[in-house]
């Protein structure tokens, strides 16, 4: 989650603005948007891997049905729309203002990372329960993920 946060909310906008400065940024829009579709298509595969690694996920999947997928896709979509807005802004700012805006973006990412690391009591209790039911051996978890066949 920390990596996804940093990638979408910081790195992506900076990379896009660097590769396509000024009005060139418009040429990236279609490819940028296509990535949302790719990410959304991977959610089911990730879900199947999680169900293999953590058996109670099967029950949670049935209970949550499609709501969790919709929430995840919505959250990533909103983050990527923000990333595109930041990319277009950065692409059209002079270097000094780019640095100032990147500092603001970095602070936002850092604040979100703190919430991911320390989500509060409720999520911490749930995560503690999850940890107790996970496989003890990391190698076992990796083998399960590696051998999970996804469609």
Image (cartoon, helix red, strand yellow):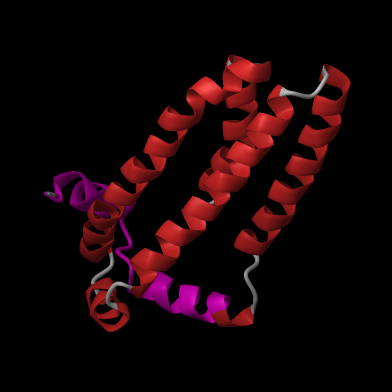
Q: Is residue 5 visible?
A: no
- Number of marks drawn: 0
Q: Position of residue 32 (x, y in %)?
A: 46, 33
- Would residue 91 appear left or right of 41 to someone viewing this image? right
Was residue 35 drawn as part of the magenta stretch in this picture? no
> Which residue is pictured at 69% across the width and 48% down the height?
109
Q: Quadrant of residue 121?
A: bottom right
> Which residue is pictured at 82% across the width and 18% down the height?
95
Look at the image and give the residue range highlighted in magenta: 123-150
Q: Position of residue 37 (x, y in %)?
A: 34, 44
- Would residue 10 appear left or right of 68 to someone viewing this image? right
Q: Quadrant of residue 129?
A: bottom left
> Which residue is pictured at 53% across the width and 81% down the height?
125
Q: Quadrant of residue 117?
A: bottom right
- Would residue 104 appear left or right of 116 to someone viewing this image? right
> Which residue is pictured at 48% across the width and 52% down the height?
77
Q: Position of residue 46 (x, y in %)?
A: 29, 54
Q: Main secondary structure of the magenta part?
A: helix
Q: Which is more toward the observer, 102 or 37? A: 37
Q: Position of residue 41 (x, y in %)?
A: 27, 48
Q: Which is more toward the observer, 145 or 138? A: 145
115 is higher (above) or lower (below) than 34:
below
């Amino acid at each position: 989650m920390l990596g996804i946060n940093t990638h979408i909310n910081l790195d992506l906008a900076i990379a896009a603005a660097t590769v396509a400065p000024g009005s060139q940024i418009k040429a990236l829009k279609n490819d940028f948007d296509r990535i949302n579709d790719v990410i959304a298509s991977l959610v089911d595969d990730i879900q199947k891997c999680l169900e293999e690694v953590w058996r109670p996920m099967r029950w949670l999947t049935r209970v949550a049905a499609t709501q969790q997928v919709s929430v995840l896709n919505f959250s990533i979509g909103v983050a990527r729309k923000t990333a595109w807005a930041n990319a277009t802004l950065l692409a059209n700012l002079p270097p000094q203002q780019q640095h100032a805006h990147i500092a603001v973006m970095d602070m936002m990412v850092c604040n979100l990372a703190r919430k991911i690391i320390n989500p509060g009591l409720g999520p911490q209790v749930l995560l503690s329960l999850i940890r107790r039911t996970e496989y003890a051996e990391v190698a076992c978890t990796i083998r399960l993920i590696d051998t999970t066949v996804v469609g």
